[in-house]
Image (cartoon, rainbow, N blue to C red):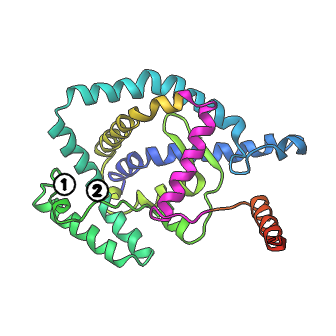
Amino acid sequence: MKQNLPMTLNRNVLVQYKLLLTLLFALVISACSSTPSAQQGLSDPKDPFEAINRPFWTFTWDYADKYVLKPASQGYVKYMPTPLRTGVYNMALNLNEPSTIINHLLQAKFSDAAKSTGRFVLNSTIGLLGFFDPADDFGWSRQQEEFGEVLGSYGVGDGPYLMVPALGPSSVREEVGDYVDRYYWPLAIIDFWPNLLRAGIIGMETRAAFADQEAILKDSIDPYEFVKNAYFQNMRYKVYDGNPPIEVDASEEEDIDAYLEELDGLEIE
């Protein structure tokens, strides 16, 4: 038991880091409770921790990304041969397939679960532990499903918005989902350093993919609000599998009803 304990602790370092930050947000609530009600009324209900989220965003974008994340991603893309890049990225994502299978089943998406099962078996064997993606040639494209999306499909709201330093936007629901996903096999049995390498590969590829949209963020009036709104739209898109229902707020719905009533009352001459 004692020999396995350090490995268990190492596997959970990243989880504990994000949990501690979440607890920090919760503790700050009491400090924010003295804020005047008028000022509270102007705040975004999805972002009750904006007072600390914004400094975390400044640190993430102006420092962590500028001096560490972006240069590392650019160097990775420049010097890593494309076939090798694609292969190791495929391997990193292949480890998510078992959690995707379970999360599909939890939403009764049996067809998607079968495809993900086929992907994992085929890519882990013929595809050499996921380095190659022969399943894609069979039409079994990757459809990553997270437990946070499962909660969303059950009607659980996003919860407060969180800006995790150096890691980017998140929410309470996503943090809970990520925590659960990390305890699915095989992620639960991967040691700290391989898991850190996997997270780094995914992170650099994610940052590289963002490069094309970077100009849009820089040109936005409020980059913080832009990222937050984009995050919630993306989460909603994922929960509804790319087909989110159209939302109309109460005031807009009242205006539409009033307009329709006026049309009904018009007399055609």
Quarter location, residue 196: top left
Query: Tag 1 or tag 2, which sits nearer the N-term?
Result: 2
Which stretch did the figure color magenta? Answer: 219-246
Q: Are marks 2 and 1 in contact (CB under 8 Å)?
A: yes
Q: Residue at x 64, y 62 (%)?
A: 247
Point out the image quarter for the N terminus. bottom left
Q: Amino acid at mark 1?
A: Gly
Residue holding disc 2: 95
Q: Position of residue 245 (x, y in %)?
A: 57, 66
As drawn, which residue projects farthest toward the left? 126
Point out the image quarter for the C terminus. bottom right
Q: Secondary structure at mark 1?
A: loop
Badge 2 density bin: few <14, some 14–19, many ≥20, Cα 10 Å: many
The CA span between labels 2 and 1 is 8 Å
Q: Position of residue 178 (x, y in %)?
A: 47, 55
Quarter location, residue 37: top right
Q: Residue at x 70, y 39 (%)?
A: 50
Q: Residue at x 59, y 27 (%)?
A: 58
Residue holding disc 1: 130
Badge 1 density bin: few <14, some 14–19, many ≥20, Cα 10 Å: many
Does residue 187 sit above or below 51 in this rendering?
below
Left or right of 170, for residue 114: left
Q: Position of residue 166 (x, y in %)?
A: 50, 34
Q: Secondary structure at mark 2?
A: loop
Report the number of numbered marks.
2
Q: Amino acid at mark 2?
A: Leu
Prevalent SS, magenta region: helix
